[in-house]
Amino acid sequence: MKITHLAGFTIPALLLFKHQAKSDLNVELYPASANDIDNTIYHQVAFEEVLGLIDDSTDILHLHGFSTLSFLNTSNQDYSSELVSKAKKQKVKLVFSAYGEENRIKSNELNKFLENTFDHIFVSVPDSIYLLNEIKKTSWVNPGLSSEILEASEKRDINDRPLRLIQILRESYKDESSTLTKQLKDLIAEEKIQLSELKIDNQTNLGSIMQAFRTADVFIDNLIRPYSYFSMLAMGAGAVALGYNPTEISQKTPVLSLSQIVNTDENTVKDKLISLIKQPKSVSDLSERSFNFANFNLRIEISAAEIKKTYQELLKSQ
């Protein structure tokens, strides 16, 4: 079985590729720069690149992340028909992994494109979980974290220092930083917390993200929409993750019901942090539980086995 991976969102694509490369699967990863774990985490992909990877030398073309579909922003061309037509001619199955970056795609026809184009869609993070209800050919697969991600730092002990917070700044959420800083300004002024910001753009690499998580006590994810893949990475580094985690999300799949995400929104974030500051032991306990959850439930071996099974079922249906 020959699998070609196209990395738009590099981190999960690379982790899956590296695991599959050790198995009986024949795998390739594009672009070549995505093979470096410290390379940039997003790759914009032209339509011609996607079309060019559909040939009779591969069985499955697996696209990772909405950045692989950035061509949808450029014109009203019927991209779906072209992709499906060539895939059928070459007997290639098209698979997509959704990672909550759909805000990069401005097309109002996104869901229609996904349903008409792909033979199967994997959903691995809560901020894309709505696709399970809206598109038939979808399934949940746990985000696969490898041993290089699952590496907790030393035990978090905040008895004699401020609580260290990390917030990721994304292009699509430009108001996040100023809003949070205003909400927490008195805690910052009293030196009860230290708030650091990590900008996520096309130049950010995985190494800098994981280093930030390992030196932080708490990661604050998006507080308006369901929490993201970055919360999964943070838990893998032993950080406490605060994010929007309503009941309808946490009960969607068995693994999400076990998640150690602290359900937080814009109105409760300050109170949640004050509670952590007042109870230092809760930080170390939550940190340990978060890492254990990720280490037990989110390992690449689990998700890779499910993905391979889906590949096999797709090829049987030819």
Image (cartoon, rainbow, N blue to C red):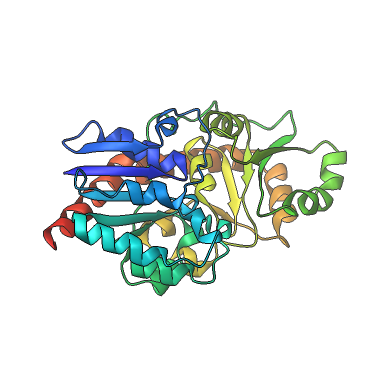
Pick the front one: 31 or 273: 31
Q: Image check: 172 left or right of 162?
A: left
**Quarter of the image where one finds residue 214:** top right
Figure check: 136 above or below 29: below
Horizontally, is 143 left or right of 274 in the view? left
Give percent across and percent down for residue 137: 31, 67
Apparent side of residue 181 relative to residue 83 in the rendered image (left or right): right
Residue 135, placed above or below residue 34: below
Task: Look at the image and tell me whether residue 49 can be seen.
Answer: yes
The quadrant the C terminus occupies is bottom left
Residue at 29% from the left image edge and 56% from the top image edge: 94
In the picture, measured across the screen, residue 124 lies left or right of residue 105, that is left
Q: Give residue 291's position: percent from left, percent from top.
A: 46, 39
The answer to whether residue 139 is visible is no
Q: Residue at x 41, y 74 (%)?
A: 134
Q: Nearer the viewer, residue 77 or 155?
A: 77
Which quadrant would the N terminus be assigned to in this image?
top left
- Most foreground residue, 311 or 50: 50
User: What residue appears at the point 52 percent right and 42 percent down from the top-left corner?
Assistant: 42
Indicate the position of residue 18 as horizontal and vertical percent values. Answer: 32, 33
- In this orientation, which residue lies closer to the viewer: 193 or 4? 4
- Residue 225 drawn at (x, y percent): 59, 62
Q: How many marks?
A: 0
Quarter holding residue 193: top right
